[in-house]
Image (cartoon, grey):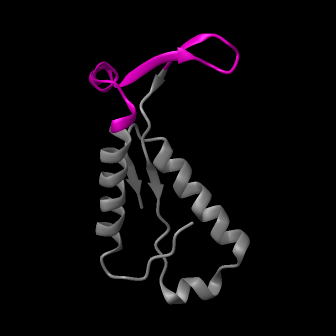
Amino acid sequence: MLVLGQPNWRGVLQKILQDFQSQSRRFYLPEHLNAGAFISTNREGKVQTFPLLSLSIGVVELTPERCSELDAGQLAALASKAKHQAKALPGYSLHV
């Protein structure tokens, strides 16, 4: 969990997504990058196609008034829902 208070939080998160995508590309061969996936053996010893690493960010945008109404469990539930929705999008995603 990351808490950002600056006005440009969306730009900060976009930069994180761009940096992750740029840095993660170095782990793959050109043919993996072109295919958008690689083939390897999974934990059960079976050959499987795996997508390239991507980063999904779920955001819960809160106002000070809303913060005072939430307890830790409610905040965790909101964060979990945002993460789930972000991961449902293909590739790199930012869901608010």
Residue at 53% across, 89% down:
65
Quarter of the N terminus within the rendering:
bottom right
Residue at 64% across, 71% down:
75
Establish if 42 lies above or below 67.
Answer: above
Question: Considering depth in this image, is 18 or 96 the residue closer to the camera?
Answer: 18
Residue at 37% across, 29% down:
28
Magenta residues?
26-49
Residue 75 relative to residue 90: left or right: right
Residue 73 relative to residue 88: left or right: right
**Quadrant location of residue 44?**
top right
Establish if 68 lies above or below 13.
Answer: below
Q: Is residue 11 magenta?
A: no
Q: Where is residue 73 in the image (x, y as percent from the top left)?
A: 73, 70
Q: Is residue 33 magenta?
A: yes
Q: Where is residue 23 in the image (x, y as percent from the top left)?
A: 34, 46
Quarter of the C terminus within the rendering:
bottom left
